[in-house]
Image: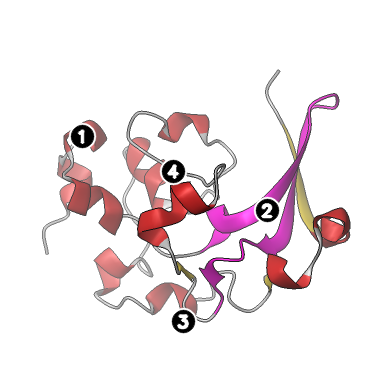
Amino acid sequence: MDKFWLNTAIEDMSDQQWESLCDGCGKCCLQKIIDDEAPLMYHTSVACKYLDLKTCRCQVYEQRQEKVSDCTKVSAANVADFHWLPETCAYRLVAAGQDLPAWHPLQSGDAKSPIKAGMTVKKWAISERKVSPDRWGEYIIEIQQLDE
C-alpha cells in the first residue's frame, strides 16, 4: 500500500488524494454555536441536515457549499485554521506529519472501518431536521476555548 500521506506534502496532493483523507467520521458536519464574547465554541450533537447518519457521508457533497453557505471545506491552505476538528481527523494528522490510525479506510482498506471502530457520529448524532436551532444548546457535547 502506498502511504502517500506520509510522503507527499499536503499542498502537493492531487484532489483525489486529498479527498481520500476524509475518514467519514461526520464530526465536521456537527453544528457549532460560537460565543464571540467568551470566546467559546460549543460543539453539539446536531448534524447538518444533509449528513446521512447511516453512512456518515454528505448527501449533497458536490453542492454542499451552495446548499450550506458555512459548510466546512478543509483544504491544504486552511487546514491549520480548523483547530476545532477532532484530534483523529486525517487532515489534522497529515498536516502535522503523523500517520493515519489503523481504522482509517486508507489503512484498513475498508470504507466502513471508521463506523465499525466507533469513530463516527452514527450512533449519537441527531439531524438538524429534528431539532430547531433555538434548541441546539440542549445538545452541547463539548465546549472549546477559542484563541483570541
- Magenta highlight on residue 41: yes
Q: Quadrant of the C terminus?
A: top right
Residues under numbered marks 3 and 2 in contact, where contact means CB atoms less than 8 Å apart: no
Identified at 70% across, 29% down, the residue is 146
Estimate the x, y position of residue 26 in percent, counting from the top left: 52, 63
Callout 4: helix, strand or loop? loop
Cα distance, mark 2 to mark 1?
30 Å
Label for residue 116? Answer: 3
Q: Amino acid at mark 2?
A: Gln
Please name which of the two marks, 3 or 4, marks the residue nearer to the observer: 4
User: For the view shown, which residue lies furthest in the left direction?
Assistant: 2
Residues under numbered marks 2 and 1 in contact, where contact means CB atoms less than 8 Å apart: no
User: For the view shown, which residue lies furthest in the front direction?
Assistant: 66
Q: Earlier in the sequence, mark 1 or mark 3?
A: 1
> Looking at the rendering, which quadrant does residue 141 occupy?
bottom right
Identified at 68% across, 53% down, the residue is 31
Q: Which residue is mark 1?
A: 9
Q: Residues within 10 Å of mark 3 (few under 14, many from 20)?
A: few
Q: Earlier in the sequence, mark 3 or mark 2?
A: 2
Q: Which residue is mark 4?
A: 73
Label for residue 54? Answer: none
Estimate the x, y position of residue 139 in percent, counting from the top left: 82, 61
Callout 1: helix, strand or loop? loop
Q: Amino acid at mark 3?
A: Lys
Cα distance, mark 1 to mark 3?
29 Å
Residues under numbered marks 3 and 4 in contact, where contact means CB atoms less than 8 Å apart: no
